[in-house]
Amino acid sequence: MTREHVLKTINLVFPAIGIGSMVFYEVCNTYCSSLQGWFMGLNLKVIGILFMAVLLTFALPPVSRWNDSVQRLRIMLLAGALGGETLLIRFQVLHNTYCPFCLAFGSCILILFFANFTKTNRYPALGAFLAGVVAFALFFDGSIVPLYR
């Protein structure tokens, strides 16, 4: 298998896993269902599903004729998401409440980022990472709703 084939597989499989983890999170009725988050008023579950759907679309064959542009956009989106995930994981650590579905989603972003990262895009990726951190610092609203049974 060539590196390109492995990368194409990663870019198809991990967004699908990310979508699946958000769907399971939506139907979760365990302790992790107490975690709730919004970004600019939108539910993070919906944003996560849409984000991974975009990444999955980028991996489909019709997009391949714009491969260089799509690759740059993909790494920028992943770097920004990684910056946001940093704050989301921090939120879980601070509140000592961990969601396996959220952590799986974050792991998918991390794997996708490192699989697609090249040295040629390190400065734009750093800028996008910092933008993701700042955006989530400003626009993330999270809460932990206690569940009583």
Image: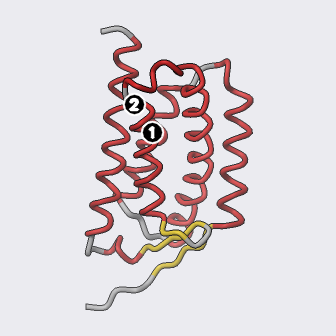
Residue 147: give x, y in percent of width and height: 34, 86
Q: Please tell me how many numbered marks the rendered image carries.
A: 2
Q: Label 1 belongs to which residue?
A: 55
Q: Are the residues at dot 2 and dot 1 in contact (C-beta closer than 8 Å)?
A: yes
Q: Label 2 belongs to which residue?
A: 11
**Residue 26 sits in quarter:** bottom left
Residue 98: give x, y in percent of width and height: 41, 64
Residue shown at 52% from the left, 64% from the top: 93
- Which corner quadrant holds the C terminus? bottom left
Residue occupying the far top of the picture: 2
Residue shown at 32% from the left, 75% from the top: 31
Residue shown at 38% from the left, 63% from the top: 99
- Say left or right for 124 vs 86: right
Badge 2 amino acid: Asn
Asked which colour scheme the image uses, the reply is: secondary structure
Disc 2 and disc 1: Cα gap in Å? Answer: 7 Å
Q: Is residue 28 above or below residue 16?
A: below
Q: Is residue 12 above or below residue 97?
A: above
Q: Secondary structure at mark 1?
A: helix
